[in-house]
Structures are given as C-alpha cells and as structure tokens.
Image: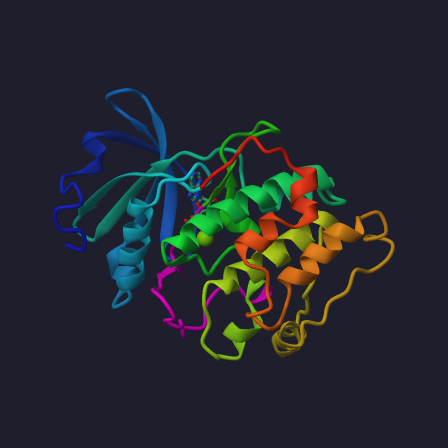
Amino acid sequence: LLFYKEAKTYDIKKDYDIGRVLGSGTFSTVKLATQKSDSRQVAVKIIDKTNLQVNTDSLRTEVKILKSVEDPNIVELIDIYEKDQKVYLVMELLTGGELFDRIVNKYPNGYNEEVAAELTKKIVLSVKYLHSRGIVHRDLKPENLLYASESNDSDIKITDFGLAKMADGDFLLKTACGTPNYVAPEVLLNEGYDASVDMWSIGVILYILLCGFPPFYSENTPELFDQIINGSYDFPSPYWDKVSLSARDLITKLLQIDPKKRFTPDQCLSHPWIKNLTTNKEIRT
Ligand code: ADP
Ligand code: MG
C-alpha cells in the first residue's frame, strides 16, 4: 500500500457510483462519480500503480500536497481509496472545463484585460500561498487550470500536482520537467531552479490570455528551446495593438530570463496592471 492509514482500503464502489470519463492524463483517468450517501458529485482520479512502476514518489507528493493545502483556487482532495493495483483520489468536481478551451472557444481574440487581471491575481495569490509553504507546482499551464462551473463568473482552480515538489529553503530543484512551452529557461539549461519557475509559467499564461497564442512557439523542439533560453518573444502587430502597455510591462517582468530579476508573487500583485484592474474584495494574508 502506498497510503497506509491514509486511504480507505475497501472497494470505492461501496461509496460511489462511478460514471463517465471526464479526462485523462499520462498515468491516470479521471471519472465522474456520485456519492451514494448524499448524491454529491465528485471527480475521481484513478491511478494504476502498475503503470507507475518505480515512480510512486510523485503520486505520494501529489497526495501529500493536496492534503496539506486549503485554498479557494486550488482543487480540493476529498478522500483517498486504495485497493489492489489502484489508487483513487476523490476530488471536488470541476465542470467548467480547462482555461485553455475557454481561451480558444470563448475568446478567440484573447480575454479582456479586466477579466485577465482578475484571473491572474487569483492564480498569483494561490501560487504565493503554495510557495510560502515550500510547494512549487512546476506544471502551471492552461490545461491544468480548470473552471469550477460553466458560468462566466466561475472560479478557477489550480489542478494536477503530479509534477509538484516540496522544496525547502535554498534547496534547488534539479529535475527537468513541465511542458516545454511553459518551462523557464533555467529548467531547460538544467541549472537548478526554484519557485520562480512558476512565475515564468504565469507570464506565458498571461501572454496567451491576452492574445490567444503563445509567446514561444515552434514545431521544432531545439528551436523552441532556443527561443525560451534567449527569452526571444515579441508583441506582434496587429494582435497586440489594443493591449495596454501596462499589461505588456508585467509580462516583460515575468518573462525575465534571470530568475533573480523575475517578478515574485508580491511584486506581481503590486504591479499597477493588477492593482488598477482588479477589485480588492479578496484580501489574503
Ligand atoms: P494527470 O496528472 O494524469 O495529467 P490531471 O490531474 O491533469 O491528470 O487530470 C487529467 C484530466 O482530467 C484533466 O485534464 C481534466 O480534463 C480532468 N480532470 C482532472 N481533475 C478534474 C476535476 N477535479 N474535475 C473535473 N475534471 C477533472
Ligand atoms: Mg494534467
């Protein structure tokens, strides 16, 4: 057992009716499920341990992190089951789809700046919270940001802590990971890196939010790596003509090649673009 004492070890079907597939990842399938006792709908991430082979550490870390965090914009882990070769993570159901799909379908020309600023603020607040607890997500991208519901004012939730790491103090992470398009230069250069890699990813996400296409892009992987390592991107006309200079300024501060010069969550939150375009109702300490 991977989760001795933490997991329920009987058949999950005793407690839940398992329904259709909601999505899948490299090592998992996520299914809709209904709790028998109160008809509550949830999402169950099913991981087959035989597929993980020796790589059970990341699943342990994912569970440890999800269990330890409580934040309005981070997916909630409700329960864990483990039976035979399978681990079941019962999570709050998020029905609004991926941020990625909303960018593509609803806003083919990018989000308006108020909406984008509000969204960025929420993500940065949650990332600040994670970093303060020594957690680096390492795989922030629009596919891992899910809307709670289909409504326009739905909350966004950070999901998929499968690549996340707990780092303490000055400890530098060394494993290269994440999706190339969103990965910081120091990760590609194998230089060792810290929590600031998440801020780079937020810079990439914000860029995409405002124009609908990524800052670094090539079908050719070495070329893509080159673009990222050199921080070579621009704000091409006409797509960026209507976007404020303030928004571009924040992106520039996030897409800093030097992690020490890159904006921190606090610097990001006090940038005029965030301060002026968002309301203050969500004050967190
Ligand atoms: P992996 O770690 O294998 O990439 P994810 O956690 O990213 O798995 O989940 C895979 C997919 O399942 C997601 O892209 C999403 O479509 C769906 N999914 C994940 N969590 C939820 C959830 N809480 N509610 C609804 N759908 C989810
Ligand atoms: Mg995923």
x and y, in percent, of residue 167 in the image:
35, 64
The picture quadrant where one finds residue 43 is top left
Relative to 14, say whether 89 is above or below: below
x and y, in percent, of residue 6 in the image:
17, 45
x and y, in percent, of residue 189 in the image:
53, 79
Name the residue located 71 percent from the left edge and 50 percent from the top edge. 212
Name the residue located 55 percent from the left edge and 70 percent from the top edge. 260
Residue 165 on the magenta segment: yes
Span highlighted in magenta in the image: 159-181
The quarter of the rendered structure image containing the N terminus is bottom left
Name the residue located 28 percent from the left edge and 20 percent from the top edge. 38
The quarter of the rendered structure image containing the C terminus is top left
The picture quadrant where one finds residue 278 is top right
Q: Residue furthest top?
A: 38
Closest to the observer: 221 or 141? 141
Name the residue located 33 percent from the left edge and 54 percent from the top edge. 62
Residue 46 on the magenta segment: no
